[in-house]
Amino acid sequence: MSMETEPSSNPQKRRLSCTTYFNALWFCYSPVHQMQQYYRLGVLDNCSEKFNALFDCLYLKTKRSTEVQEILETREKAKPHIWTFRTREEASSHWRELFGNLDDME
């Protein structure tokens, strides 16, 4: 979710902004985006993901700020990390598995 800092006395307080989700939905329905999707994938985009993101943001705006913070923190923790962490030994064996044939070329 998009968060903006309020210019109030409390710099930690953040406010939820749905503007980016609205802009993304608006662009999704534009002919430029639809033609890009048709050219790249062969189908038009129904924009359901962007609509759901906007709806979710508007739904969160109806909650108390403490509830919103808890929900967003829970979602952030539930997201899988994009990197796979390996120990030095795991990384070394994985590297040899992928690129071990390059050692034989010398």
Image (spheres, helix red, strand yellow):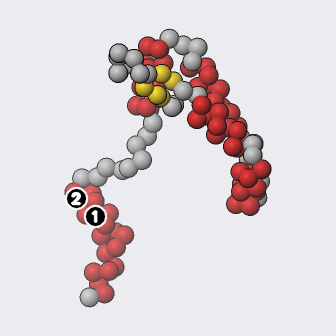
Frontmost residue, 34 versus 40: 34
Residue 96: where, in percent of width, then height? 30, 70
Please, what is the three-letter code of the amino acid marked with disc 2?
Glu
Number of marks? 2
- Vertical side of 60 occupied by 4: above or below: below
- Vertical side of 86 occupied by 25: above or below: above
> Does residue 14 appear in this view?
no
Q: Are marks 1 and 2 in contact (CB under 8 Å)?
A: yes
Name the residue at the left extreme: 88
- Residue for badge 1: 93
Q: Quadrant of the C terminus?
A: bottom left
Q: Locate residue 95: give its quadrant.
A: bottom left
Query: What kind of element bears circle 1?
Result: helix
Please, what is the three-letter code of the amino acid marked with disc 1?
Ser
Residue 29: where, in percent of width, then height? 75, 43
- Vertical side of 100 occupied by 91: above or below: above
Q: Is residue 90 left or right of residue 60?
A: left
**Identity of the residue drawn at 48% across and 21% down:** 15
Residue 84: where, in percent of width, then height? 36, 50
- Residue for badge 2: 89
Marks 1 and 2, Cα distance to the nearest angstrom? 6 Å
